[in-house]
Amino acid sequence: MKKNPNYALFDIAGVPYLLPFGQGVADFCRGVRLNDAGVFLWNALDETDSREQLLTRFLAHYQAEPADAAPLTQDMDAFLNTLSSLGVLCQDYEQLYVPDLSSLCFRIGALTLRLVSPADAVPPELLPFEVSGGADADLTVTLCSNTLPMLGNGALLLRNEELLVCEHPDLYALFFPKFPQILECRLTKDGARANIRHRPPYGSAFRTDLFHAIRFLYLYTAQKHGVFALHSASILYRGRAWLFSGHSGMGKSTHAALWHDLLQVPVLNGDLNLISLADVDPVVYGSPWCGTSGISDTGAYPLGGIILLKQHTADICETLPDDTKALLTAQRLISPAWTAGQLADSLAFTERLSGQILICLLKCTKEPSAVSAIRSEIDAYCEKFFP
């Protein structure tokens, strides 16, 4: 338990009050009138590290007999709960409202995601990735429908029509303007835990919104583990994954579909591919997030290359200098770039990646001739490096 730094104890005409100031005033936090016991407990919080230590000091202060211990304990807990509900106390993150709910684990790429939620809130898109276990999950997401202790506004890092991110000392607060039932998400900076405050009921619209909200959390944690997400459609050709990436509407799904129709190669994912350099060779992992294509895969495949697409009147494959390859690929990542440090991580990743795989620019039409133009480049690359 920690004191909210935007509260202080004041004496008004001999009556003690806990009153907000600074950001607490801006956030319309409430004041609290205290009695003598409340003043003692507030001051003792600075000298104790746990509820048990605080209770021991509280009982000793009143020289409590055994018969008095139970009612005094109830009084102390009621007082602490009141302060917590008003945001006057900030509990440690791992102690925040972890309800007794069902728990499912999913292996997505190189990470394990644990979702603690009502059973009927689980997004069905995650179920193909379900695994047993989860004690060592890389990210635990807990749904809570009750009130979290109040936060200040924090430092605004990002705001658009889909996402608002505010930074606090130990966590990020995420808000989703287009998801009406998801009120707030808190993500620890180490990426290990997240709480999602929401409003039931759990219909299909809620499950869809939750699925997309979890994506933001997962991608943050994945980046912490060296796994990055590329906005791309992917195919499996010559035993390797090949990613076609471009801006929305550029034709990446169309191009992947052409390969499937002309050469009967599998399409792995229609929108988002996870890439890791943890192994000797770059690896592409399947992802449940696949846009409107509905095409996803649970496997892992060696990465052959990334084809950057640009619409053109003809089909022309161009080589790129190293800096351009790293920059353009980084611009296609949808891993977080909320901070300069995250952007630096992305650039370092794509610079390293560009030295290990084929990255080229395909100026192309949406005709079958586009497949022929890049296929010859891929075949030549494979014969040279993957004989």
Image: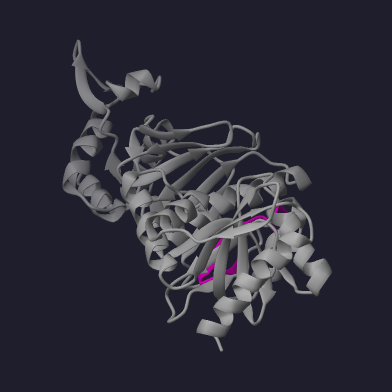
Q: Is residue 190 visible?
A: no
Q: Residue 51's x, y, as percent?
A: 30, 51
Please give left or right for residue 114 compared with residue 297 in the image: left
Q: Residue 342's x, y, as percent?
A: 37, 51
* Residue at 27% across, 27% down: 7
Please give left or right for residue 201 compared with residue 156 in the image: right
Q: Residue 33's x, y, as percent?
A: 32, 22
**Which residue of the protein is positioned furthest toward the right in this rendering?**
261
| Camera-side residue of 1 and 317 | 317
Please give left or right for residue 61 compared with residue 175 in the image: left
**Which residue of the protein is positioned furthest toward the bottom in this rendering?**
387
* Residue at 76% across, 58% down: 294
Q: Is 111 inside the magenta-drawn segment? A: yes
Q: Is residue 181 above or below residue 210?
A: above
Q: Is residue 373 visible?
A: yes
Q: For the C terminus, which image quadrant?
A: bottom right
Q: Main SS of the magenta segment?
A: strand
Which stretch is magenta? 104-123
* Residue at 39% across, 22% down: 27
**Which residue of the protein is positioned furthest toward the left in this rendering?**
47
| Camera-side residue of 201 and 217 | 217
Q: Is residue 78 above or below residue 26?
A: below
Q: Quadrant of residue 151?
A: top left
Q: Is 60 inside the magenta-drawn segment? A: no
| Camera-side residue of 6 and 278 | 278
Q: Quadrant of residue 53?
A: bottom left
Q: Residue 61's x, y, as percent?
A: 18, 43
**Which residue of the protein is positioned furthest toward the top in this rendering?**
13
| Camera-side residue of 254 and 63 | 254
